[in-house]
Each structure stands twice: as C-alpha cells, then as structure tokens.
Image (spheres, helix red, strand yellow):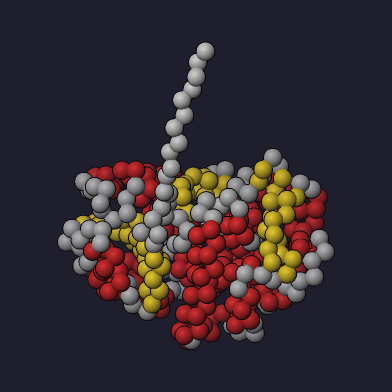
Amino acid sequence: MHTAEKQKISVKEAIDYQVVTADEPWEELAEIIRSINTQQAVFFVDENVFRLQDAFIARLESLVKRPILARVPAGEQSKSVQNWASLVDFCLEQGIDRQTPLVAVGGGVTGDLAGFVAASVLRGLPLIHIPTTILAIVDSSIGGKTGVNHSVGKNLVGAFYQPRAVVSFLKVLDTLPDSEFISGFAEVLKYGAIEDTGILALLNGRSILSLRKDPQLLKEIVQRCIKVKARVVSEDTKEAGLRMILNYGHTFGHALEKVAGYGCISHGQAVFAGMVAAGVMAQKLGARIDNSLIDQHAAAFVTRGFFDHFSIEDLNKAMQSDKKVSRATVRFILLHEYGRPYLHPVNDAEFITSVWEESFQKMNQLCS
C-alpha cells in the first residue's frame, strides 16, 4: 500500500517596510537606497513627472552611480499587458541583477505597472515607491497590490508584491493638476467613510482644492489615510477578509471605468460615483446613514449629465467580470453607518439596476 510522505514548509511572505511622508525626505530615501544598492537602480518615471520635475528627477538619479531610466506614458491605458512586457524587456536588456532596485516614480498607474514588473523580473526586484499623486500616496502605493488591466476587467493580471519602502515627497504635489488632486480625494473620502470619520469632519463644508493652500491640514489628512491603509493591509495582506473594506465604492466604480473605457473617466470620478451608489444601496437596505458628508463634494468630481451615456445593462455585465464576484453574486462593501463597513452579497440583478437608476438621478441632482 502506498503511503504518502508529507513535509510542512513555512514561508515568511514579506519583510516589514516603512512608509515615509514629508515635504522632501531626501535623507530617508538615500538611506533606504544605500541599504539595497548604490551602484545602480532602475527608475520608472511617469512622463508628466519627468516633464514637470526635472530637478527632482536629476536628484533621484544622483543617488546611484548608474541610474537606468524609463518613462511611463501617463494614463490608465498604460496599464496593459503589452506595456508590462515591454518594460520587462527593458529591464532585462540592461543587465540588472536581483539586487537592483526598481524605483516607481509617479501615480497609481506607474506604481501598479512598475510593481508588477518588479514582481516578475528575475522573480523579484527590490521595489521602492515614490508616489507623486494624492491617490498613490494614500492608497495604491501601500499594500503590495500590483498589476495591469485586461479586456475582461480592471487589474485582473498582477501579483501581490510588497515594496521595500514607500517614500512620499509632498512638495512634488505642487505641480499636480487640480483635476488629479481632486481625483485622489475620492480615496481620502473612502477612508473617512470606512474607518476614520474624523477625515470627513475635517472636509465637511470645505472645498477640496482649498487644501492646496493649507499644507499642514493636507499633511494631517494624508497621514490619517495612510494610518488606516497600513492597519488594514498589515492584518490582511492578500485581501482574504478585512482588506475588502478598502473596496468601498469600487465595485460600482470599476464597472463605470470599464464601460467608459479605461482612462476615459478618472479613477477618482468612478470611485466617488461608486460611493454615492453604495450609499443609495445601503439606504435601500434600511441603513440610517447621512450620506451628505460624501455627497456634498459631488460637483468637484462630476458634472450634470455625466452618466447620461452609460448603459445600465452594460454596467451590470461589467460587474460580472469584477474580482469581487463569485458565481454571479456581486459582493458589495456597504456601511451600517460611517465607520462601520460590512460585506453584502447581492444576486438580484433587478435590485442592482434600481440602485444604478436611483444613483444616476441623485448625482444629477447633486450637480444641478
């Protein structure tokens, strides 16, 4: 009789890493790079950052003897399998080794793309994120999610791959366009909704763009968001449970992005609209929640008629390809009240359709 032998293998998945945030944390970044490799590093730089921040890029390159730089085209369209393969080729052609850090300099698109390249090349390069947008600073650079989009859906090809460090230069935000600054605040509002309700209180009655003139308040809000993200991803590195609360608004939002065409609306616009829809759904299910703390910012994100060209049938189909779908049941993160998120599965397509319809009407009213 055959007897199978079994051996248990224990694996430590990732090392701890620091998230550094300051106006210009050059000393901290130099120390991090010194701890990995000062001979050479690969820099993937968003083309907009390269164009607007030449002195910043030059100083980054001076941190190693042999800087290897590739520009990443701006926009969601860059998160493609073709771009990933092209950047993998670029890295391998440079003769790098496993001790060559890959430094991602840009927003969420650059970070997601660079992270997947770092996870793939030579089975893993040391990854450093230098996020240059609000969205990337508070959200996408932290937690190890990397990947690219596929025609079937958003972020369906990728890997969980933790960085060695995340270093944010808030001074770089000075050249960030207003539209991108606002877009990132959809994720800020999300953190306020799911956990730190004090964030919503700080933004209550305040224009998002006014924070450009209040760097201390901006820094406080950013730090509070990072604290929430760090706590959640530390407890759930691979979205097996708790981390799903970070998807608040994203199930609706990803469907909007797919139907519009990736890059045709901003991630912030999609997530904001998704949070409005999630608020509508929660109320239809009986939640007593005052959605005004989020709804009041609608005009900053969308204009009246924004949704007129969306087909609800197409949106429902797009939801079926989302990662948060299991056997035709769509899983939504909803709120009992601010700071109390919960997972709610829905398999009633007519109910979801009614939520879309009511949400579109509400958004038009908020923007009128």
Q: Residue at x 50, y 15 (%)?
A: 2
State the image coordinates of residue 253 (x, y, percent, origin top left): 62, 58
State the image coordinates of residue 131 (x, y, percent, origin top left): 41, 66
Q: Nearer the viewer, residue 267 or 95?
A: 95
- Report how many numbered discs are placed on residues in the image: 0
Q: Residue at x 20, y 61 (%)?
A: 38
Q: Is residue 270 visible?
A: no
Question: Which quadrant: the C terminus?
Answer: bottom right
**Height in image: 115 above or below 60?**
above
**Height in image: 118 above or below 49?**
above
Q: Is residue 53 visible?
A: yes
Q: Quadrant of residue 274?
A: bottom right
Relative placement, left or right, of 97 versus 245 is left
**Height in image: 126 above or below 121?**
below
Q: Quadrant of residue 282?
A: bottom right
Relative placement, left or right, of 357 versus 299 is right
State the image coordinates of residue 172 (x, y, percent, origin top left): 38, 75
Q: Residue at x 43, y 73 (%)?
A: 176
Extreme residue in the top direction: 1
State the image coordinates of residue 258 (x, y, percent, origin top left): 59, 52
Q: Residue at x 41, y 48 (%)?
A: 12
Q: Quadrant of residue 53?
A: bottom left
